[in-house]
Structures are given as C-alpha cells and as structure tokens.
Image: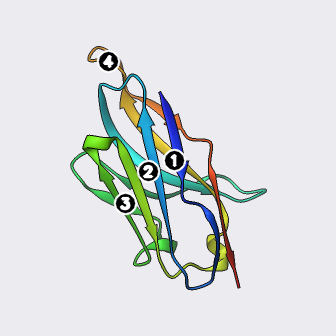
Amino acid sequence: VQLQASGGGLVQAGGSLRLSCVASGSIFSIDVMGWYRQTPGKQRELVAAITSDGSTNYADSVKGRFTISRDNAKNTVYLQMNSLKPEDTAVYYCNTRLKDSWYGRLRDYWGKGTQVTVSS
C-alpha cells in the first residue's frame, strides 16, 4: 500500500491550499483517513480525520478554517485549508487505516509528507 500526497507549497497568510492523498495498492477496505502535521522538535499532531461514513474530527486550532473530505471510489482524502496562518507551517502527513484483505486486520499507513509554508 502506498500513500501519495500532493498540494503543499508556499502561501501568504490568509491564503488557501488544498492537499490530496491517494491510497493505492492492495486495499480491501479503508476505515479512517486523516491528516497530521509536524514541526521540528514537536510531536506529530492530528489535524483532521474522517471515517468511512463521513464523520469528521478536527484539531481545535483548525476548526472553522480546514475541511476534510474523501472520495471513497478513488481512495482519496482531501484537506481544504483556508485562512492559513504562519503557525500552520509544518510538514503534513497523510494517514490511512485500512485492511488489505478480508481476513486481514486494520493497519496504519503513512505518506511521505508534504511541506506547507505560510508566510506572514
């Protein structure tokens, strides 16, 4: 299973970016898809997550500004980031919890990360 993230970049404060992450490979079913972020010297933190039935969870710091969505047919999760702030600067990682066969167990997979930089 591979996760390919895209959409990061440099943006001014107040701007927007949209991250995408596609899961490919041996996939039987996908449970949760989410985005985490990490800055140097800090632990990776949850930004947003979405379950297979569309339930969402957001970090308090991004509520009202970020929106997570997914396309189950494409095994893709999106993160629309609006009103970006310099403190949103981080490497953003895609995470997926899935089963690779009907008899397998749920496992977590991570993408390589995409840099988001917000200038003031």
Instruction: Tell me residue 15's x, y (percent).
Output: 55, 81
- Which comes sooner in the sequence, label 2 or label 1? 2
The residue singled out by tag 1 in the image is 94
Determine whether the residue tagged by mark 1 lies in a helix, strand or loop: strand
- Which comes sooner in the sequence, label 4 or label 2? 2
Query: Do tag 1 and tag 4 residues touch (Cβ < 8 Å)?
Result: no
Identify the residue at image location x=56%, y=78%: 84
Query: Do tag 3 and tag 1 residues touch (Cβ < 8 Å)?
Result: no
**Label 2 environment density (alpha carbons within 10 Å; few <14, some 14–19, many ≥20):** many
Q: Quadrant of residue 55?
A: bottom left
Where does the C terminus fall, quadrant-wise? bottom right
Say what amino acid the circle numbered 2 marks: Gly
Identify the residue at image location x=54%, y=53%: 6
Say what amino acid the circle numbered 1 marks: Cys
Colour scheme employed for the rendering of this structure = rainbow
Query: Do tag 2 and tag 1 residues touch (Cβ < 8 Å)?
Result: yes
The residue singled out by tag 3 in the image is 57
Q: Residue furthest right?
A: 41
Determine whether the residue tagged by mark 4 lies in a helix, strand or loop: loop
Identify the residue at image location x=54%, y=38%: 110
Q: Determine whether, in the image, residue 114 is placed left or right of residue 102.
A: right
Give the label on residue 34, or none.
2
Q: Residue furthest top?
A: 103
Up the image or down, 99 lies above or below 74; here it is above
For the residues labelled 2 and 1, the Cα–Cα distance comes to 6 Å
